[in-house]
Amino acid sequence: MFRDSLKCLLIVMSINFTFTSYVQAQENNHKVNVIGEMRKVMWEGELEGVINLDTIGTKENLYGLGPVEFLIGEVVIIDGTTYVSTVVSDSTMKVEESYEIKAPFFAYDTIKAWKNHTVPDSIRTIKQLEGYLDVLTRQSLRPSIFKISGMVETATIHIVNLPTGAKVSSPSEAHQGQVDYELVNEQMDIIGFFSTEHKAIFTHHDTYVHMHLITKDRKKWVI
């Protein structure tokens, strides 16, 4: 997740912000699929996958995000392609394309069209982004998946990397082995989840958003 500071969140020259076309989604009674619960993983140690991504029927126009089971990596789906990132070292990560992945909690949606919005220059932190999303989606079906595209000047991002056999009964234990990486001047996409009613289910208890970032060259991505 981006750290909530001016130094490393969304410090960009220009950024294009997009979100699901909810007018069509509401007419079709369409909503984001949320599988599993973060709190069961973080507080109860239920690390096994509850969804096999290969079982998601329609891959076309699919977007989604979540961790790999046993918290040994991260997953993001962009336009039907699944990217899995894992830690190689403190300075290197591995990014692969694969649907043969299980996740202990996951959110996904099929999005055929996006409504485009330019993020105001005043949006510099996660809290400010939350407020912007709250206003933007207030008349829409929630929860929602959004996409941000642009250049990030600096960002600190991470991959979960829980040691084999580790037990988890708190968020701090769940982040054992986590590796942080620094990005500088990278073109990137962010796939994010926004909801005011999913704290501890798909967002941490102090935020309404859960975001995964991947660089445009698809070689680096983490949350």
Image (spheres, rainbow, N blue to C red):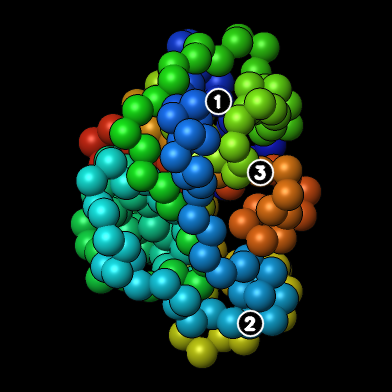
Residue beneath disc 3: 195
Callout 3 secondary element: loop
Residue positioned 47% across, 44% down in the render: 30
The residue type indicated by label 2 comes to Gly
Callout 2 secondary element: loop
The residue type indicated by label 3 comes to Ser
Callout 1 secondary element: loop
Foreground mark, 1 or 3, reads: 3
Residue positioned 73% across, 49% down in the render: 197
Examine the rendering and report whether any part of residue 94 can be seen: no
Q: Is residue 97 above or below residue 127?
A: below
Foreground mark, 2 or 1, reads: 2
Residue 133 lies in what quarter of the image? top right
Left or right: where 180 falls relative to 80: right
Residue positioned 70% across, 22% down in the render: 135
Examine the rendering and report whether any part of residue 21 can be seen: yes
Of callouts 2 and 1, the N-terminal one = 1
The percent position of residue 79, horizontal first and vertical second, equals 27, 41
10 Å neighbourhood of mark 3: few (<14), some, or many (≥20)? many
Of callouts 1 and 3, the N-terminal one = 1
Q: Is residue 44 above or below residue 72?
A: below
Residue beneath disc 1: 10
10 Å neighbourhood of mark 2: few (<14), some, or many (≥20)? some
Of callouts 2 and 3, the N-terminal one = 2
Q: Is residue 16 above or below residue 194?
A: above
The percent position of residue 54, horizontal first and vertical second, equals 27, 68
- Mark 2–mark 3 Cα distance, whole angstroms, equals 24 Å
Q: Which disc is residue 139 wearing? A: none
Foreground mark, 2 or 3, reads: 3
Residue beneath disc 2: 45
The residue type indicated by label 1 comes to Leu
Residue positioned 50% across, 49% down in the render: 32
